[in-house]
Image (cartoon, rainbow, N blue to C red):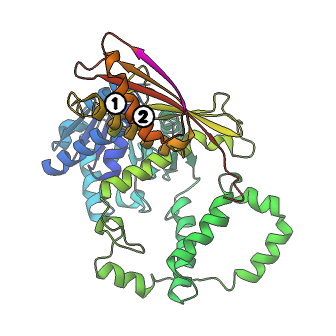
Amino acid sequence: MTLEVTVVGAGTMGAGIALLAAHHGHAVQLVGRRQAALDRARDRIAGTLSFLAAEGYCEPAAAEGAASRVRCSTDMAAALRDARLVVEAVPEDPGVKELVYRAIGAQARHEAIVASTTSGLNVFELARDFPGPERLLIAHFWNPAYLIPLVEVVPGPRTSPAVVRETEDVLRSWGRAPVLLREYVPGFVGVRLNAAVYREALDLIDKGVVDARGIDVVMAESIALRLPVLSLLEIADFGGLDTFVRVWEHMFPLISGASEVPTAVRRMVGEGSLGLKSGRGFYDYGSRSTDSLLRDRDRRLLRWLRERHRFRMGGTGEDPMKRSRIARAEFGVRTGAFSHGYCVDLGPALAIYTAGLLAVDAAGDIVGGDDVARQAEHIYGVLERIFREAGATLDDVVKTTAFLTDIRDYPRVNEVRNRIFAGREPASTIVEVGKLVHPAAKIEIEAVAIRAKSDPVGG
């Protein structure tokens, strides 16, 4: 299913949805009011696609193709002309949305599906005079839209069932998990559940019962720990509904029913403590850049999305290959494999295999000049970072293979290797080759490590 897709709104959500649609083969028009915002969105999309390719989520050629399918425009009328699917992703300002729906209604094709990504506004009220209300609905994505599968689909009072079905089909083709609500309620399902948890957490902090870190430890070490295995209502089933009813009867009258955000949180916002975007919120994010923290979050989400089916009750069971990729642009040039390494689950242990690594950085420049020892030192440093990515160290290395363009360099390379491994003596093979993939590279090294799994209870 190939569609002309127009996304109106070039912020974080709009750019993420444009990336998602383009990644699945659609031509996308991304509309913004200002060229500067579109330039930022284009850079964000290109950077994210490069990151996803480096992480093994897609091949580099597919990432480049997706980036080329996103066109940016400040001309909404032209961008809407051929769209079969229009996604509205402008800020959560009722006045702004009302104007945008007026423009979409006047300029889009009469058969185009129009989906709002609002987090809670009643767009059916805001777009009361929208021509063709049977093709208007809500499709609430979660951030980052290119990774989080959930999309809450909310039809309006006059939305056609056929339009709902077609929207769900498109979302499934994009790898999303649509959940259909029978009717509009403010906040849908996810935001309401989220808000309920946050209301109680903030109330406990405001009363001085516990601090932010204590709340997060309680969540991480109990509630959140169970959710990957059992879903929310399955936990109640497993615990016994009679038991849960007794707990709820006691607790429901006692938990927060606040209708206002606590003063302490409002004060934080007023003082500029906005969270990651300002470097400080409930936590101090120090000197780490926003981009590096977001990339770290996305990297961890990717790994979890690849592995989560193995842990879910009633899921599809373990992947028979039990293999995950290790790939990051900063690890530089490698040969013989799509990723820098692979981590293979052997049951009681993990085996980590690396590709042949060169002393060539992500920009294609040689590191260490023409000094083979310095090139080797750089490669061992990259190997150490790759193994660290899999929770291993150089202590876990059991075999290295070095490919040299001149076997006479072996003594200097062996000195480096002996210093790096300091008596640990993993098996070693030296091979002389005619040339390597980079003309200035004198050595290529690959390695194998085996790490015993730690006890998940004892840590």
C-alpha separation, residue under disc 2 versus residue under disc 1: 37 Å
Secondary-structure class at tag 1: helix
Query: At label 2, which amino acid type do we have?
Result: Arg
Q: Main secondary structure of the magenta part?
A: strand
In percent of the image, x 67 and y 86: which residue is there?
254
- Figure disc tally: 2
Across and down, in percent, residue 7 comes to 30, 43
Asked if residue 205 lies in the magenta stretch, the reply is no
Q: Quadrant of the N terminus?
A: top left
Does residue 311 appear anywhere in the picture? Answer: yes
Q: Decide if residue 449 is on the left or right side of residue 39.
A: right
Q: Decide if residue 308 is on the left or right side of residue 441.
A: right
Across and down, in percent, residue 267 comes to 35, 85
Q: Which residue is mark 2?
A: 417
Q: Which residue is mark 1?
A: 63
**What numbered label is drawn on residue 19?**
none
Against 55, residue 99 (above or below) is below
In percent of the image, x 55 and y 70: which residue is there?
216
Against 300, residue 398 (above or below) is above
Range of magenta residues: 426-431
Query: At label 1, which amino acid type do we have?
Result: Ala
Q: Nearer the viewer, residue 68 or 118?
A: 68
Against 316, residue 144 (above or below) is below
Which one is earlier in the sequence, the residue at label 2 or at label 1? 1
